Amino acid sequence: MELRVLRYFLAVVESGSVTRAAAEVHIAQPSLSRQLRGLEAFLGVTLFDRTGKRMELTAAGRRFLPLARDLVTRADTALAAAGSLASGRAMRITVAAPATTITDVIAPFLATWGPEDPLVTVQAENPLRAYQALTRGADVAISSAPPRRRYAGLPVARLPLWAYVPPSHPWAGRDRITIQELTGEPLIVLTLAHGTRRILDQAVQDAGRSLDIVLECDTPQVAQAMTASGHGIAVVSDDPRFGLHPLLILDQHGEPLQIRLHAAWDAGHYALRTIESFATGLARFCVEQYGPQAAGS
């Protein structure tokens, strides 16, 4: 059963006449009639009642009509998708990223998209294993670690590390704190799986100091919650919650501590144009959201 013949069948149903349908599909009337007879023979049923002036569907034809429409619609969808693949565009992509990046960066960026943009599925990954998701079906991965050489990619953003304190804290009137001052306070930090923690540890080591860690958390939201409940100062990179006050953390040279986000993908990916458009758009959004200092490069 050929899709071409199904299209002929639908044309006759919509026009009610073999003559009008033949003109619409640009085929001779005798040929169209033969195609319909062949379809009926293939199916083993009579689809049209030919006794009147208008081609009316039989009971079998009425049952077959929605099936034919569904098959043609599916074929048209497949052809459109194939055209998108051939042009390097995709109607849907999957993005893998750490949960904090999804909440604070990717989701707000996707909220700026329109209905003409591709659908995006986002899956949360451990920060240390984000790039591994590319071997499990993800189309693009976002991580704080530079991508491996086997992948293409670009720097997306540089986001500051924040020390969060309650409004009642003596530092609540300030906008920044040095790493030396921070090491003298009880801290709530993330686990070593997070790039934020690794950057903090390196800055502390470079300053020749040590941390007073009262709690390690796997999620930055919990770290901020513990700070809000008075257990210490949270050091994270996500946006403020629970009414906490953010302080930039300066290293021993007076430079803000920053975490870098990178996007990576397979250089030979069939949807290369869509992926590159997503990554460059995300980088542009970060600059618009957080200022020029957030530019990835």
Image (cartoon, grey):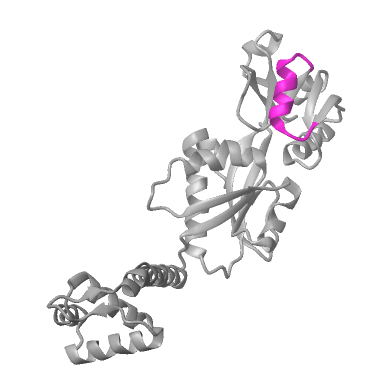
Above or below for 255 versus 75:
above
Residue 249 place in picture, x, y as percent = 69, 26
Would residue 218 be counted in the magenta stretch?
yes
Left or right of 56? Residue 104 is right
Q: Residue at x 17, y 88 (%)?
A: 29
Q: Position of residue 188 (x, y in %)?
A: 79, 25
Query: Which quadrant is home to the N terminus?
Result: bottom left
Q: Is residue 294 left or right of residue 37?
A: right
Observer-nearest of 135 and 248 = 135
Q: Residue at x 73, y 34 (%)?
A: 219
Asked whether 125 or 131 is in front, the reply is 125
Q: Position of residue 111 (x, y in %)?
A: 46, 40
| Count of numbered badges drawn on the protein | 0
The answer to which of 53 and 273 lies nearer the viewer is 53
Q: Residue at x 45, y 64 (%)?
A: 89
Q: Which quadrant of the figure has residue 228?
A: top right
Q: Is residue 64 above or below residue 102?
A: below
Magenta stretch: helix, strand or loop mostly = helix
Please check the rendered image and state whether residue 13 is part of the magenta-colored stretch, yes or no: no
Q: Which residues are magenta?
A: 217-231
| Residue at x 85%, y 26% (from the top left corner) | 211
- Can you tell which quarter of the image residue 70 is in? bottom left
Q: Residue 33: tell me if it is visible.
A: yes
Q: Is residue 1 visible?
A: no
Above or below 125: residue 87: below
Q: Could you say which is closer to the camera, residue 79 or residue 117?
A: 79
State whether residue 283 is above or below residue 229. below
